[in-house]
């Protein structure tokens, strides 16, 4: 308890204890879910074990069918900072020991499709068909602030996504990717044990 007071002060400690009580009641395997949090479609979410969230996170599943299955799955020891928004309508899988910075957006779907035979702009966006493609974030990934992870993407194990990147294609394991769209700038060399430029 002394450690809590040293870190958070009196009122901060009271707040953490309230959040811990909420976590114990609503996400029993969680470590600490900070309030406020917006969880929609909880039956479609597997929170894994030992999850930690910041404030103002929005975690939602949007089922296109009546089938009861998990659309969003977290592994063990996932840490999300403030204002992370994750939306799943098909499949979003987040592995073990993933660290997600603040204001990150992860989604497996779009309102409409925008290729050659895409959705008409005459249809209001909210009325366009929801098009989904699975997202996988493998173990030990670190996602920096303001990153967007778009549908159909796999981020490989041990990778780092730099701040403000837009990930619209797969990132191989043990890579550092930055930019909009994100591109790999370094990979880890297990022989030299160093990050090396591409």
Image (tube, rainbow, N blue to C red):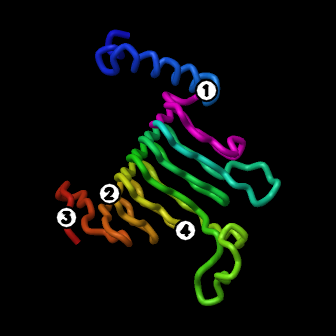
Residue behind mark 1: 28
Question: Sequence-wise, which precedes: disc 2 or disc 4?
Answer: 4
Depth check, mark 2 against mark 3: the one in front is 2
Task: Please report contact status of discs 1 and 2: CB closer than 8 Å, yes or no.
Answer: no
Snapshot quadrant of residue 180: bottom left
- The kind of secondary structure element at disc 1 is loop
Q: For this view, does 175 lie left or right of residue 155?
A: left
User: Split into 4 quadrants, where in the image is the N terminus?
Assistant: top left
Estimate the x, y position of residue 14 in percent, counting from the top left.
45, 16
At label 4, counting other C-alpha atoms closer than 10 Å, the crowd grade (few under 14, some 14-19, many 20 or more) is: some
Mark 2 to mark 3 CA distance (whole Å):
19 Å
Q: Which residue is mark 3?
A: 196
Q: Which quadrant, please, contains the C terminus?
A: bottom left
Image spot of residue 137 (x, y percent): 48, 55
Residue found 55% across the figure and 52% down from its top? 86
The residues tagged by marks 1 and 2 sit, at their Cα atoms, a distance apart of: 32 Å
CA gap between label 1 and label 4 equals 30 Å
**Disc 4: which residue:** 152
In-front residue for pair 11/184: 11
Nearer to us of marks 3 and 4 is 4
At a point 66% along the width and 81% down the height, the residue shown is 119
Q: Number of marks in the image?
A: 4
Q: Residues within 10 Å of mark 1 (few under 14, many from 20)?
A: some
SS class, disc 4: loop
């Amino acid at each position: 308890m002394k450690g809590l007071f040293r870190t958070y002060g009196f009122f901060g400690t009271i707040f953490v204890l309230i959040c811990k009580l909420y976590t114990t009641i609503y996400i029993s395997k969680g470590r600490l879910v900070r309030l406020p949090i917006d969880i929609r479609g909880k039956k479609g979410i597997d929170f894994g074990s030992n999850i930690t969230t910041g404030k103002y996170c929005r975690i939602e599943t949007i089922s296109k069918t009546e089938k009861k299955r998990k659309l969003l799955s977290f592994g063990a020891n996932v840490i999300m900072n403030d204002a992370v928004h994750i939306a799943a309508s098909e499949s979003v899988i987040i592995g073990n020991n993933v660290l997600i910075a603040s204001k990150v957006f992860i989604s497996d779907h779009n309102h409409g499709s925008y290729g050659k035979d895409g959705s008409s702009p005459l249809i209001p966006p909210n009325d366009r068909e929801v098009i989904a493609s699975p997202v996988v974030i493998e173990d030990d990934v670190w996602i920096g602030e303001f990153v967007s992870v778009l549908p159909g993407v796999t981020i490989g194990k041990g990778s780092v996504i730099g701040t403000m990147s837009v990930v619209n294609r797969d990132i191989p394991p043990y890579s550092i990717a930055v930019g909009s769209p994100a591109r790999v700038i370094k990979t880890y060399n297990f022989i030299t044990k160093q990050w090396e430029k591409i």
